Image (spheres, rainbow, N blue to C red):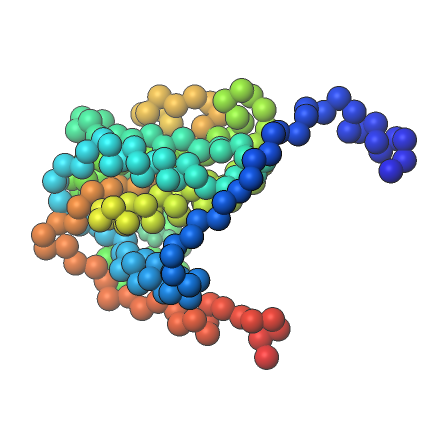
Amino acid sequence: MTEETSDRFKGLPPLLPHISFRRYDPGVSPEEGARRFHAVMERRRTVRMFSDRPVSREAIEQICLTAGTAPSGAHKQPWRFVCVNDPALKREIRLAAEEEEREFYARRASREWLEDLAPLGTDTNKPFLETAPWIIVVFALAKSDDGRLVYYREESVGIAVGFLLAAAHHAGLVTLTHTPSPMGFLKKLLNRPDHERPYVVIPIGYPADDCAVPDLKRKPLNEIMVVNRGD
Ligand code: IYR
């Protein structure tokens, strides 16, 4: 290292204390562990028909804790999970979201987008925003709470949301990853500070008794996985 480059490292904070790591041992082989987890995750579905059956705050807290175990750029943990169960606030969110969706379906969405959504049967009506006992509104932090930079914000929050969806599923609950667009209204409605950006809205609860889901097929392994150069 030249003297100039080594200067760049002068006065930096010290290395954190390091502790020995013990791997999680599922007690079965990796093949079996992965197969079992796939069997669980294969049953996850995005649901749009929710029951109003209550879910405890404790369950939601545990799910957020799991989301918070996600890796993040420089361990900045650039996420906030705003959990809404107040019926009046849920109603406000529904009404504002439906207003945006009316604009989306009437004008903003391209023809191709409408074509892609038609088989799923989505429309401007978002009753689940009131029916589901909780809505988790995920915010991405554009800056840390202490005003410092965050890195790979979108990727980090995306991973955390993936963990959140898996945690909810593991708890026997269902979710919808809902993206009213644009989502700016959520910041105001939920009174969030300037450095928080709405990322996704996740109604969470039990499925309605008559809950139906589209008969979707998932891509087979040979369409999603390539080994080496694919030969
Ligand atoms: N935000 C709209 C449209 C919508 C967009 C996508 I991409 C979806 O996968 C589903 C819906 C709505 O919520 O209806």
Where does the N terminus fall, quadrant-wise?
top right
How far across and how far down the image is residue 231, in percent?
59, 79
Give above or below for 21 relative to 41. above
How far across and how far down the image is residue 128, in percent?
20, 43
Q: Which picture quadrant has residue 213?
A: bottom left
Give above or below for 101 relative to 212. above
Front residue (pair 200, 43): 43
Give above or below for 193 relative to 128. above
Give above or below for 57 relative to 178. above
**Left or right, residue 129 beside residue 5:** left
Residue at x 39%, y 54% (from the top left corner) = 26
Q: Residue furthest left?
A: 209
**Left or right, residue 214 beside residue 107:** left
Residue at x 45%, y 45% (from the top left corner) = 159
Q: Which picture quadrant has residue 40?
A: bottom left
Q: Which picture quadrant has residue 5?
A: top right
Residue 130 is at least partly visible in this image: no
